[in-house]
Image (tube, rainbow, N blue to C red):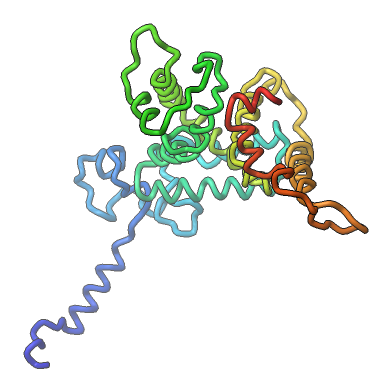
């Protein structure tokens, strides 16, 4: 329609526009909206594309480009890899599982670091897995009441009442209340170093990576994480010289648990696994095991 011809850009204008777009190369942590980003720390005077040595951070062939600026990342890729290697040597994970989980963790950190500062990316990832309000491990830790200073008897209250109790201010001299427990947890999470946060995430991913069907029993997986984390920080693990045999975790922890669950529903007849003719009430399933590891009463049974 000739009436709209004046609004159509000319061919030369389109070429100029495309040339301008080619010069715009978005990066990850360098242009992230963090107060420590390069363009912010320089007063915001550097326009896009005028960073010192931009090719060092804009190389698309480099792995995890948003986790590459040494001035921003809390831990280098090599330091995170050393954490995975150390945990593997102490707990006997498989080498391939270590490589897969390292790549998975770095991919998540790189993805988040492209939208926020790297330090915040690590903090948020740790909150999602371990320490945040919605982390399953945090919910399990509160319910299992493993510490000696937790309420000795878990009160059976509805969710609304429990939420009101958690939001109350901590009375002076009353450290054995749900609100005090939450405050102590937050203080503990805030006091963690970046190294400790990375180690928590790496340990959880390594345990999960070889868990098989145990992934359907998250409360048991939380219990295993607690045991493993305590062991890694113990003098026994620190003084260990020889690395644990590769596959020890899968062979001595996961396989016996898997066999127990499998035998609840199947039996071997003529060399083949056949589903048992057993009433549901007589079968120990995933939910039953979860319930055992969810409460202090269940934990005391083992």
The residue located at (35%, 49%) in the rendering is 115
The residue located at (46%, 25%) in the rendering is 192
Q: Position of residue 33 (x, y in %)?
A: 29, 45
Relative depth, front residue between 246 and 223: 223
Please indicate, yes or no, whether residue 188 appears anywhere in the rendered image.
yes
Please indicate, yes or no, whether residue 203 appears anywhere in the rendered image.
no
Relative depth, front residue between 218 and 47: 218
Relative depth, front residue between 241 and 244: 244
On the rendered image, what quadrant is the N terminus found in?
A: bottom left
Q: Position of residue 6 (x, y in %)?
A: 8, 85
Image mark count: 0
The residue located at (49%, 17%) in the rendering is 151
Instruction: Specify the farthest residue to the top.
Output: 173
Relative horizontal placement of residue 298, taking residue 128 as reference (left or right) = right
On the rendered image, what quadrant is the C terminus found in?
A: top right
Instruction: Specify the farthest residue to the bottom.
Output: 2
Relative depth, front residue between 28 and 130: 130
Q: Quadrant of residue 201?
A: top right
The residue located at (74%, 37%) in the rendering is 253
Relative horizontal placement of residue 54, taking residue 217 as reference (left or right) = left
Q: Position of residue 66 (x, y in %)?
A: 42, 49
Relative horizontal placement of residue 28, taking residue 294 as reference (left or right) = left
Q: Position of residue 191 (x, y in %)?
A: 43, 22
């Amino acid at each position: 329609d000739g009436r709209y011809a004046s609004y159509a850009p000319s061919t030369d204008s389109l070429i100029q526009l495309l040339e301008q777009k080619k010069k715009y190369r978005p990066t990850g942590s360098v242009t992230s909206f963090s107060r420590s980003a390069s363009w912010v720390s320089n007063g915001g005077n550097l326009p896009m594309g005028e960073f010192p040595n931009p090719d060092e951070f804009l190389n698309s062939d480099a792995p995890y480009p948003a986790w590459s600026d040494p001035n921003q990342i809390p831990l280098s890729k090599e330091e995170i890899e050393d954490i995975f290697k150390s945990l593997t040597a102490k707990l006997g994970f498989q080498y391939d599982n270590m490589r897969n989980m390292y790549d998975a963790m770095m991919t998540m950190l790189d993805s988040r670091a492209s939208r926020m500062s790297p330090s915040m990316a690590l903090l948020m990832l740790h909150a999602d897995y371990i320490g945040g309000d919605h982390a399953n491990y945090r919910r399990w830790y509160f319910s299992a009441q493993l510490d000696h200073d937790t309420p000795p008897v878990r009160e059976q209250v509805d969710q609304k009442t429990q939420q009101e109790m958690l939001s109350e201010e901590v009375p002076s001299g009353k450290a054995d209340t749900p609100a005090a427990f939450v405050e102590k947890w937050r203080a503990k999470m805030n006091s963690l170093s970046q190294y400790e946060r990375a180690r928590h995430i790496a340990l959880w991913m390594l345990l999960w990576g070889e868990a098989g069907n145990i992934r359907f029993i998250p409360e048991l997986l939380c219990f295993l994480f607690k045991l493993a984390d305590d062991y890694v920080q113990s003098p026994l693990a620190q003084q260990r010289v020889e690395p644990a045999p590769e596959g020890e975790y899968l062979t001595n922890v996961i396989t016996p648990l898997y066999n127990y669950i499998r035998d609840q529903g199947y039996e071997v007849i003529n060399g083949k696994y056949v589903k048992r003719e057993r009433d549901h009430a007589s079968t120990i399933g995933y939910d039953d095991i979860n319930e055992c590891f969810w409460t202090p009463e269940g934990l005391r049974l083992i």
